[in-house]
Image (cartoon, rainbow, N blue to C red):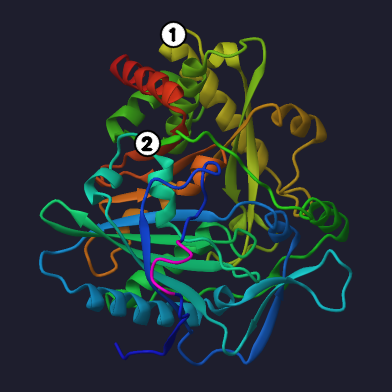
């Protein structure tokens, strides 16, 4: 692969350390040392100048925290770090060519009313790519056991000021028997949803491995009509940033449900509801969460999970559509039912509620209501809404950047948005991994409930 142009941003090493978010005003636990920050330009050809107006499905995400994930790779002994960095930069340039809006910035549309946003790109725009080092142990960070969020979060970069929508960071870590790479990815959700973001990552991985190119993105926001009334409602909500605080000692852990585990959940609820592997996994962790929490049994619990509407729009959108095209399925169940002593009883309550929420969300999709839960649901849900991020169908463990498959994938943004983060099992056995973030006491209770429920399936 031919070398491509990129520019150093000339930030002195060790200055402006890239911390994606911190739990409080306390300094992060991970000692990240910034070595270089480059501006990686899309390889030609790209448009001289273009703008993509945000649709009503995009503008909802303007004030929300970005999606941040980390891919952990174990490097072969004796690998040259400079060669690793050069390979990542060169392949990134090729990937951004197809996804050139990600090199642009989010801005208010000039000359329009104050609520119209667009993604604006012009020749010369570039993506920030940071090279860093860290003394923390790779094997401790790339683990399934609970880890402090403040040690993991700095491995994913912040978005640069000025409306940037994408940033990458490659961090070198000491590892057992050699070295490890933490590849951090941060994207503004107003630019694209999880399906489009992982389409970009798979395109980057293909370029890094000199593999066959994936289908290019479809960059055309006119494919989604913009209902002015709903756009106005969602845009008004986008005026201020959403700031999320979390405890200093917040933990992040990953729990795996094997294919056999999921099948046993399906067997438990088969007579009452249609139960896919996704429904089984979410029903299992939702019920464990509520049983561990031991909250008010007289209230309801709410779980919102994303539903990709590309194939359900009228007319259908291509699978490669670049942007946001997700709505939400809202599952509602009594906390008492979710936390009851009988494993089968609480699984039935959780899975039935999730399946019903999905069925309602996908039945007769209306482009004007795809993002809009009812006012009653909104009011109730704000008292304690859990959400779901990512999907096993994104195949995160297939992202080989030329170093083999990731040994671990972490959705670190899940730690500050109250979500369950999903990925396919790295074992490739049809299982599902679920990332969960809780304070230490809550994590201990959840682990105990999870282990007990698995043993009693």
**What range is drawn magenta here?**
12-17
- Residue 400, horizontal then vertical, whole percent: 28, 64
Q: Earlier in the sequence, mark 2 or mark 1?
A: 2
Left or right relative to 180: residue 280: right
Q: Name the residue under label 2.
A: 253
- Dot 2: element: strand
Figure check: 325 above or below 36: above
**Quarter of the figure that contains the N terminus:** bottom left
- Foreground of the two, 285 or 345: 285
- Residue 431, horizontal then vertical, whole percent: 32, 39
Left or right relative to 148: residue 405: left
Figure check: 178 above or below 54: above
Q: Mark 1 points at which residue?
A: 342
State the CA–CA distance, disc 2 to disc 1.
Answer: 25 Å
- Dot 1: element: loop
Quick check: is 74 in the magenta stretch?
A: no
The structure residue drawn at horizontal position 67% and vertical position 37%, both measured from the top left corner, is 360
- Residue 75, horizontal then vertical, whole percent: 19, 63
* Residue 240 can be seen in this image: yes
**Quarter of the figure that contains the C terminus:** top left
- Residue 38, horizontal then vertical, whole percent: 43, 78
Residue 331 is drawn in which quadrant? top right
Q: Which of marks 2 and 1 is in front?
A: 2
């Amino acid at each position: 692969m031919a070398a491509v142009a990129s520019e150093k941003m000339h930030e002195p090493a060790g200055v402006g350390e890239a911390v994606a978010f911190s739990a409080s005003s306390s300094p992060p636990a991970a000692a990240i040392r910034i070595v270089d920050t480059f501006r990686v330009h899309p390889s030609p050809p790209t448009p001289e100048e273009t703008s993509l107006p945000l649709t009503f499905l995009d503008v909802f995400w303007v004030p929300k925290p970005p999606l941040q994930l980390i891919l952990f790779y174990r490097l072969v002994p004796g690998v040259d770090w400079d060669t690793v960095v050069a390979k990542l930069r060169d392949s990134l340039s090729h990937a951004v060519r197809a996804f050139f809006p990600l090199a642009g910035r989010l801005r208010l549309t000039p000359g329009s009313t104050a609520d119209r946003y667009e993604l604006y790109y012009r020749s010369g725009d570039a993506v920030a790519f940071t090279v860093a080092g860290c003394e923390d142990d790779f094997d401790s960070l790339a683990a399934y056991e609970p880890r402090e969020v403040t040690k993991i979060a700095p491995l994913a970069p912040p978005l640069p000021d000025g409306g940037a929508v994408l940033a990458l960071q490659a961090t070198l870590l000491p590892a057992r028997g050699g070295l490890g790479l933490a590849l951090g990815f941060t994207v503004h959700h107003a630019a694209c949803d999880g399906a489009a973001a992982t389409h970009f990552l798979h395109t980057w991985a293909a370029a890094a491995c000199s593999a066959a190119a994936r289908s290019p993105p479809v960059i055309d926001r006119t494919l989604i009509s913009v209902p002015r009334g709903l756009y106005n409602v969602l845009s008004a909500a986008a005026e201020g940033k959403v700031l999320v605080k979390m405890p200093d000692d917040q933990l992040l852990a990953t729990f795996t449900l094997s294919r056999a585990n999921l099948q046993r959940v399906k067997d438990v609820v088969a007579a009452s509801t249609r139960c896919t592997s996704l429904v089984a996994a979410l029903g299992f962790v939702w019920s464990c969460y509520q049983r561990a929490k031991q909250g008010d049994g007289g209230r309801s619990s709410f779980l919102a999970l994303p539903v990709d509407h590309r194939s359900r729009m009228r007319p259908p959108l291509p699978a490669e559509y670049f942007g946001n095209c997700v709505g939400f399925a809202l599952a509602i169940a009594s906390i008492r039912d979710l936390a009851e002593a009988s494993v089968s009883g609480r699984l039935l309550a959780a899975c039935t509620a999730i399946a019903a929420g999905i069925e309602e969300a996908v039945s007769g999709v209306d482009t004007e209501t795809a993002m809009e839960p009812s006012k009653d649901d909104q009011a109730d849900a704000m008292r304690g809404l859990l959400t779901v991020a990512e999907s096993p169908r994104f195949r995160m463990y297939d992202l080989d950047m030329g170093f083999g498959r990731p040994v671990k994938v972490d959705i670190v943004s899940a730690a500050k948005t109250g979500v369950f983060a999903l990925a396919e099992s790295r074992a490739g056995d049809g299982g599902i991994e679920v990332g969960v973030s809780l304070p230490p006491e809550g994590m201990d209770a959840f682990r105990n409930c999870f282990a007990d429920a698995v043993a009693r399936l």
